[in-house]
Image (cartoon, grey):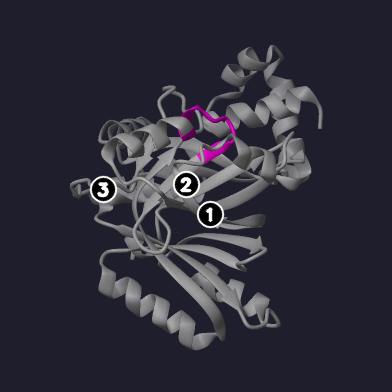
Amino acid sequence: MNKKSRKLIAELVVNSRATSKELGKKLRTSQQSVNYLIHSLEKNKIIKRYITVFDNSKFGLINFIVLVRFKSLEKENEILKYLKENENVIKIEKLSIGWDFLVIFSTSNISHFNKSLREFLIEFKVDRFVVLPIIVKYDFRKTSSGIPNILFGDREKIDLNKKEIEICKMLRDNGRSSYLKISKKTGLDPKTVVEIKKRLEKKGVIKGYSIIFNHSKLNIRRFILLIKLRDYSLEADKEFIEYCKMNKNVVSLFKCLGEWDVVLEIELENKTLVEFLKEFRENIIEDYNSSITNEIIKSCYLPESVFE
């Protein structure tokens, strides 16, 4: 992987809807070269998916992290098929060490989540599971605005019209989908598509555009770190969030309720997890647990149930 390809991936993480011309200026290369690199990265499955970052609390949704360990993974393909087809699942990460999967459910209420989870637990033999309701998510990756995204927090539900919902669905399925393609599929004029997209961004429904990429092919090790905090004061909370924000290895932070207070998504390239943990202040963390991400199997910000 050459430096130009790595730089391109970094730019697409910030804004996957950036045009070839805009990316060319960032990389100091031609549009043709950018298009060739993107095609190559897609072909080699380094870029897995283009995603749109939605704040689904604007849809009246609440989110739950479920960590699962099975007695046996003999039915792994069936488990994954079930989860991928579940209308309430927005994320699936295959893990190793401690847990088998991290799954994020997004539902309209706790009762709906409980029903969905119980159906899954009945279907498969689960050895252990932990449910962590998400209070808020801080996404520390750079955005096109340069401001970290704060998602899944306490937001008022917004009523969207049919056209806005259609645009959300198209962008959820492919964050880099062209205006022309969206226009053809929805029957809307391209100018109308642009106007609706901008309106959704202004309302805070759409928070940005990014990619899911193959970490292992870039020699990046991804970890899920579960943390129990020592100090629950407001000052300590702000200090911890700010510390994570400034740490280039912390991709995102979930504040949760339950057995663990915080879930961190960490990406390491030139250091071990032990080295990373040494940087954390011992007086902040009471306890922690970690798992390695083997693969991000599914990642989107809106469940299929929104469009039914």
Dot 2 and dot 1 residues touching (CB under 8 Å):
yes
Residue 249 highlighted magenta (yes or no): yes
Between the residue at mark 2 and the residue at mark 3, the CA separation in whole angstroms equals 32 Å
Residue 18 appears at what percent x and percent y? 53, 26
- For the residue marked with disc 3, what is the amino acid? Lys
Residue 200 appears at what percent x and percent y? 30, 37
The image shows residue 276, relative to residue 242, as above or below, that is below
Between the residue at mark 3 and the residue at mark 1, the CA separation in whole angstroms equals 32 Å
Name the residue at 40% across, 54% down.
261
Q: Which residue is mark 2?
A: 285
- For the residue marked with disc 1, what is the amino acid? Tyr
Residue 277 appears at what percent x and percent y? 61, 42
Residue closest to the eye, 48 or 268 = 268
Tell me the element at label 1: strand
Name the residue at 57% across, 18% down.
22
Q: Which residues are magenta?
A: 244-251
Tell me the element at label 2: strand
Residue 214 highlighted magenta (yes or no): no
**Residue occupying the far right of the picture:** 1
Mark number, residue 58? 3
Name the residue at 77% across, 23% down.
3
Q: Which residue is mark 1?
A: 288
Residue 8 appears at what percent x and percent y? 67, 27
Tell me the element at label 3: helix
